[in-house]
Amino acid sequence: MSAANVNVDMIVRDVARRTQADLENLTAEMTSMFVDVIPEFRHDDAVRRLMVASTASNLAAIVDMLELNISLDDITVPPAAAEYARRFAQHGLSLEALLRAYRLGEHMVVQRAMTTLGRLDLPTEAALATTSQIARLTNRYIDQVIEGIIDIYEDERSRWDARSDAARAAQVRAVLDTEGLDLASAEKMLSTSLRGWHLAAIIWTQPGSPDPDAAQLRAGAAMLSAATGKAPLTISADERTHWAWISSTAKPTLDLPLLQHELDKHPALRIAVGDDPSPGLDGFRQTLRDAQRARTVAVTAADPHRALVLHSQVALAGLLVDHLADVRAWAGRVLGGLMNDDGATVRLRETVQVFLDAQGSFTDAAARMHVHKNTVHYRIRKAEEILGHPLTENRLDIEVALLACAQLGLGGADTHPARGN
């Protein structure tokens, strides 16, 4: 080792000793700067004391490294700094703010070292070399500690979120299931008002999703927020399913085109909505039941690619979905041969359904289906031949049976309703 290097090492140790002697003042100056510059550092007294301890422990570790020539391989995150990172995560404060403090602290340490060097009246070359070495070592210390801090913060954030989510889910389920629960008690359990209007949605992912389920479900909640202009109360029902409520003093409105557009970007994501908002505790419960019915229809229905299902679109099917075997047998008695699965019969069912919805207008039905009116005439006559009687006979049963075929897939996997456009 050259004499110049020896002298630099000696000067570094001298600077470290001088910094050690003034460590209390440096800690106070640095923590005050954090509070002034970074809003997230404006804590209550208990957390502020932990922040001071974290800062002091990092400064002491840097001084020891410089004075005692401690290898960076032996540097770990000081316990107080680790605990402060955990507390930062628990309070939902941003990791970026925490890392910013470390970089500001690094800059202040180097500036303080330069001030100390200025008082030693050293040759310029020695002063520059010493400054460079202190800056390099301090930077490497900060880099290494930051790696640990990031891991500690993210692990704690995940654990804290899981604990918070589990507690919130338990409270919501209790509000949903507890008989005789009054409104005030329910609001206290959830720490939120239930006196306004509520709209619930169920968000879930299809098996085989290429992205993590948690990320997809968060994206679904964000879509719901964008489509209503309100932040939802969201809980995890299971690893692939979230329940979400939009609540407000006025009836929530849903921007369906926006929600559908965003859903199209996530092929594995599905949303069922209880889209008839209801007020109060009963409304909070009812809108979720509606969303659950809509979801059950969605996972049972003939169209597995339908990403957005509204309860208002499938309300009747939702009442029938728990009795599929009985409904299938009844629909078979009503429709007879119109229950067959071949493509021609599927088209007949679709045509009859649209025709009846058009109040028996051949012209209107043809326009809706984008076919010639004579085609509708032919299909209706053919359907009546299969039924053995006119559509005006037993019309209500026919309509319900056709709806069950279309929305619950009773007539085969190729069945899709043509109505509603």
Image: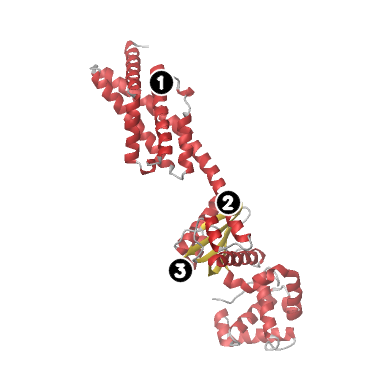
Identify the image quadrant of residue 420. bottom right
Q: Nearer the viewer, residue 29 or 415?
A: 29
Q: Nearer the viewer, mark 1 or mark 2?
A: 1
Residue drawn at the location 53% of the way across and 46% of the way down: 161
Task: Report helix, strand or loop for mark 3.
Answer: loop
Decide if residue 414 is in sight here. no
Q: Nearer the viewer, residue 84 or 238?
A: 84
- Counting residues from the start of the chain, the first of labels 2 and 3 encountered is 2
Q: Nearer the viewer, residue 39 or 176?
A: 176
| Rendering coords of residue 258 (x, y %) | 47, 65
Residue drawn at the location 38% of the way across and 20% of the way down: 66
| Rendering coords of residue 101 (x, y %) | 37, 36
| Rendering coords of residue 332 (x, y %) | 75, 77
Question: Which labelled disc corresponds to residue 213?
Answer: 2
Residue drawn at the location 35% of the way across and 29% of the way down: 27
Calculate the distance from the C-alpha at mark 1 to the C-alpha at mark 2.
Answer: 46 Å
Question: Which labelled disc corresponds to residue 250?
Answer: 3
What's under tag 1, amino acid-wise?
A: Asp
What's under tag 3, amino acid-wise?
A: Ala
Q: Quick check: 237 left or right of 141? A: right
Q: Nearer the viewer, residue 5 or 325?
A: 325
| Rendering coords of residue 328 (x, y %) | 74, 73
Question: Which labelled disc corresponds to residue 64?
Answer: 1
Q: Quick check: 94 left or right of 19? A: right
Q: Residues within 10 Å of mark 1 (few under 14, many from 20)?
A: some
